[in-house]
Amino acid sequence: MIIVSKNIASELKAYLSSNIYDKIFVLSDTNTVEKCFPLIEQALSGCHYTSITIDEGDVNKDIRQVGAVWDILSQKGASRHSLLINIGGGMVTDLGGFAGATFKRGIHSLNIPTTLMASVDAAVGGKTGINYNGLKNEIGTFHQPDCVMIDCSFLKTLDRPNLLSGFAEMLKHGLISDQETYYKVLNFDIIHPDFEKLNDLVNASVAIKNQIVEKDPNETGIRKALNFGHTVGHAFESLSIAQNRPLLHGLAVAAGMICELYLSYKLCGMPVELLRQATNFIKVQYPPFIFVCDDYEPIYELMTHDKKNKDGMILFTLLSNIGNIHINQHASKELTFDSFDFYRENI
């Protein structure tokens, strides 16, 4: 169940009143517990719940933090009839979802995303995971939450980089769906956002992802469409962490999309006009990810760990046009390096 709301407290209160759980746990990080938890605290009045707080930031999305969540769930007697409410950005919903999916082989979960990235991507679709050995989401599982409650009121607390991070996923959803959605995203003023209009755009973006997920919940086919920009983007993100200059997920995906737009042009016949338009949009809106020729081999090595790969072959999701998706596409190492050149030359 996905609820896009303008009054998260009343929606949560109604949901908890109509569902029975033996225990309730609320997971947040050190940032959202201060800025976002107060917006739902009233809905929890009268409920006996246990609050769990973890360290903020994707660098902390690791097994150590999962262990800390497991410890509290165990100490407080959580059962398979308990509910874990994850309130926060993608780091919280990813880690909390994984902790809930694996504790006693799965307890109930409810996601309340507080960033644009989490609202349109991380909190929806049932993917959970943590980083491991320097690789993004290397360990994880599929575990659908009972409910996702989205309220763009939270987004008013976000800085520009975090808004842009989530907006990259919305751009991706536009590119893999239809021209109307794509141009609505392209024409939205993300610098001075109208949050009422953004709520409508988020609703449409979530619907696109949810429609794909319902067709392919375990990513054996068409769900791979959602990986456009991510084969290169995840490698950029992992490199940035290894070089101690961590990049927000969506900023890495935006950079990755430029490379994969180029590959789409070369391998699938994407119109050059679309390549230029989407590349220019990202160039204007997003900060550049700076890397040098010596980084090409490490980036490519990181790409060999991508979960879509098969038989040692790096596989991409590419487009021949807006909404025309081609999964399981292979590009030579030389052409992949050409896409890195294209990115550096056009940012």
Image: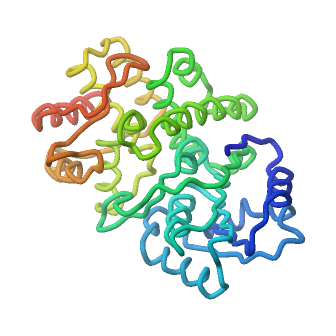
Say which quarter of the image contains residue 31. Answer: bottom right
Viewed as shown, does residue 189 lie left or right of 224? right
At 65% from the left and 75% from the top, the residue drawn is 52
**Residue that sits furthest to the right in the current view:** 46
Q: Quadrant of the C terminus?
A: top left
**Which is nearer the eye, 190 or 154?**
154
**Residue that sits furthest to the bottom in the current view:** 75
Viewed as shown, does residue 24 lie left or right of 318? right
Viewed as shown, does residue 35 lie left or right of 319? right
Viewed as shown, does residue 335 lie left or right of 61? left
Say which quarter of the image contains residue 323. Answer: top left
- Tell me residue 125's x, y (percent): 53, 46
- Tell me residue 241's x, y (percent): 34, 60
Does residue 55 sit above or below 207 in this rendering? below
- Tell me residue 226's x, y (percent): 43, 37
Does residue 102 sit above or below 120 in this rendering? below
Specify the color scheme: rainbow
